């Protein structure tokens, strides 16, 4: 039994290493796993997510950092990498509370439409009081030089906490979201994405993807954003240090 468990564990570790690519911070031996010598634990996206998944968003309180907010920035970076980065691509951090000048919902929809070149701005319908961002956290798009309608757009929701499974179906389809809140919805409906710092079981993959769209779990995020983005690196580093000082991984 113990040999089988060990074999299954190393099989999972090898799968994670392949899925995360250069973002996997450990080296795997025949009977051991250890931190790779080149890895700074304060800068590793994988380690940040590992601690977030194991200890939760309330860990590392002494750092005075809200890790779920930094997870949104990391997710946005991963999504940008996945869709591509050229002169006609773009992104927008829509999550509430917004860190831009577009504080209220209509202003944020107006700004998003302006940057997309589609959407026509906010319509006259606003979200319910408990839907300050209508479940939309990040938006990324892969555009064209002509700026004409019809481009690849993705709407993403970030779920850093342990309750992520109930969030799988919260974000409406891109078509429904745009028809609900935009005056003139984009010609091609946005696809949906879900970002979680957790690791899915093999059995969960297909069902979660059907319900949530393109799922970015810990390894996929680490693959596309192996190092914490510079603008949140200091905050993430403080949180990782505080989380490790107050917890011991199982």
Image (spheres, helix red, strand yellow):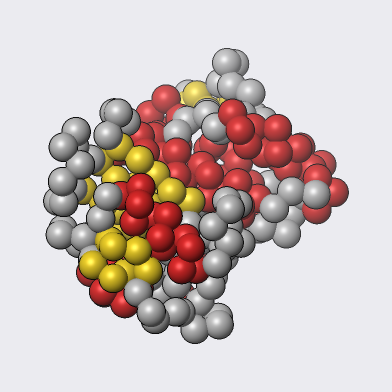
Residue most extreme to the right: 62
- For the question of whether residue 122 can be seen, the reply is yes
Q: How many marks?
A: 0
Image position, residue 208 (x, y; %): 32, 65
- In-image side of 138 versus 141 (left or right): right
What residue is at 25 percent from the left and 55 percent from the top?
A: 118
- In-image side of 64 versus 128 (left or right): right
Image position, residue 127 (x, y; %): 46, 79
From the viewer's perspective, is residue 49 above or below residue 177?
above
Q: Between 135 and 180, which is closer to the camera in this rendering?
A: 180
From the viewer's perspective, is residue 172 above or below residue 200?
below
- For the question of whether residue 16 can be seen, the reply is no
What residue is at 39 percent from the left and 55 percent from the top?
A: 112
What residue is at 44 percent from the left and 79 percent from the top?
A: 126
Residue most extreme to the bottom: 128
Residue most extreme to the top: 38
Image position, residue 172 (x, y; %): 32, 73
What residue is at 59 percent from the left and 22 percent from the top?
A: 39
């Amino acid at each position: 039994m113990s040999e089988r468990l060990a074999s299954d564990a190393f099989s999972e570790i090898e799968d994670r290493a392949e899925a995360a690519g250069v973002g996997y911070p450990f080296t795997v031996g025949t009977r051991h796993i250890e931190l790779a010598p080149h890895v700074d634990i304060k800068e590793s996206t994988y380690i940040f997510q590992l601690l977030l998944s194991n200890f939760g968003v309330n860990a590392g309180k002494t750092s005075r950092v809200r890790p779920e907010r930094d997870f949104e920035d990391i997710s946005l970076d991963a999504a940008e990498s996945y869709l591509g980065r050229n002169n006609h691509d773009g992104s927008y951090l829509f999550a509430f509370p917004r860190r831009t000048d577009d504080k209220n919902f209509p202003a944020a929809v107006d700004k998003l439409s302006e940057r997309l070149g589609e959407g026509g701005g906010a319509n006259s319908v606003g979200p319910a009081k408990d839907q300050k961002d209508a479940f939309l956290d990040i938006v990324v798009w892969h555009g064209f030089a002509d700026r004409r309608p019809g481009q690849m757009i993705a709407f993403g929701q970030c779920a850093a906490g342990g309750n992520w499974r109930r969030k799988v179906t919260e974000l409406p389809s891109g078509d429904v979201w745009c028809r609900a809140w935009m005056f003139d919805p984009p010609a091609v409906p946005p696809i949906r994405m879900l970002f979680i710092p957790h690791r899915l079981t093999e059995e969960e993959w297909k069902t979660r993807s059907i319900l949530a769209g393109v799922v970015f779990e810990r390894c996929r995020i680490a693959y596309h954003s192996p190092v914490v983005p510079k603008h949140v690196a200091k905050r993430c580093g403080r949180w990782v240090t505080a989380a490790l000082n107050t917890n011991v991984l199982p």
